[in-house]
Amino acid sequence: MINHDIENNGKAFNLNDYFQARLRTIETLNKISTLMKPGISEPQGIELIKKELESVGCQKIWHPIKFRIGKNTLKSFKEKSDPSVTLKENDIFFIDIGPVFLDHEADIGRTYQLGTNKEFSDIIEASEKIFQETKKTWKKENLTGHELYQYAKSLAREYGYYFNFNMLGHRLGDFPHALHYKGNLLDFQSTPQVNLWVLEILISDKSKNFGAFYEDIL
């Protein structure tokens, strides 16, 4: 794939450290998900996440932590949550964290559930499938950033969900990636370079009562 100027990294960029930051973030996120119990609010959950990140050596948080519960899972990154929502015994929630480990950025988002609600498990599974299938097609057909999102939207429709275009993907790298590019992936009209771009998938059910989020690097 073409290495565009805006896809450069700083002199400190190390691919192994970058991958290690991602793996540590996934491990931490999965542990954090098990700590979320019925009755917890989003502000309480965010404080819990901050403490857990500190305990595993996170150097800093490069974007605000997002912990969304129930109907708030419909909301994109910049939208404000309803603060009265708390986690129920049968519920859906997602977590989006952007920690810095080893001077490299990570950005992972995953959706989880409490209980056995099939609608929740179905949409969680669909969000990951849409991500993985879009990534596979991007590799095979050299899709541009714009084409990536159009493809993801069509997959969401096939699975029976609405696609939220307010989560647009972005660059990543050694901190801070914004020195090289501040724009989003949707507007990127070239084929994004492998490992340096984040694809964000946010979908909602037909009744728009809840959503699911999946985020990782391409």
Image (cartoon, grey):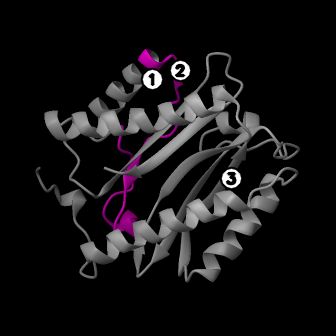
* Distance (Cα) linking label 3 and label 1: 23 Å
Residue shown at 36%/61% (left/top)? 172
Residue 161 tag number: 2
The residue wearing badge 3 is 67
- Residue at 33% x, 58% y is 181
Q: Quadrant of residue 89?
A: top right
Which of these two is toward me, 177 or 199?
A: 199
Say whether residue 178 is magenta: yes
Q: CA–CA distance between discs 2 and 3? A: 21 Å
Q: Is residue 98 something that shows in the picture? A: yes
Query: Which segment did they paint magenta?
Result: 158-186
Above or below 191: residue 12: below
Where is residue 142, by image quadrant?
A: top left
> Mark 2 touching mark 1, by CB under 8 A?
yes
Classify mark 2: helix, strand or loop: loop
Instruction: Reply yes or no: does residue 52 show up in magenta.
Output: no
Can you give x and y, in whole percent of width and height, for residue 21 in the image? 41, 72
For the residues labelled 2 and 1, the Cα–Cα distance comes to 5 Å
Image coordinates of residue 127 in percent, x first then y, are: 49, 35
Residue 33: x %, y % from top left: 65, 57
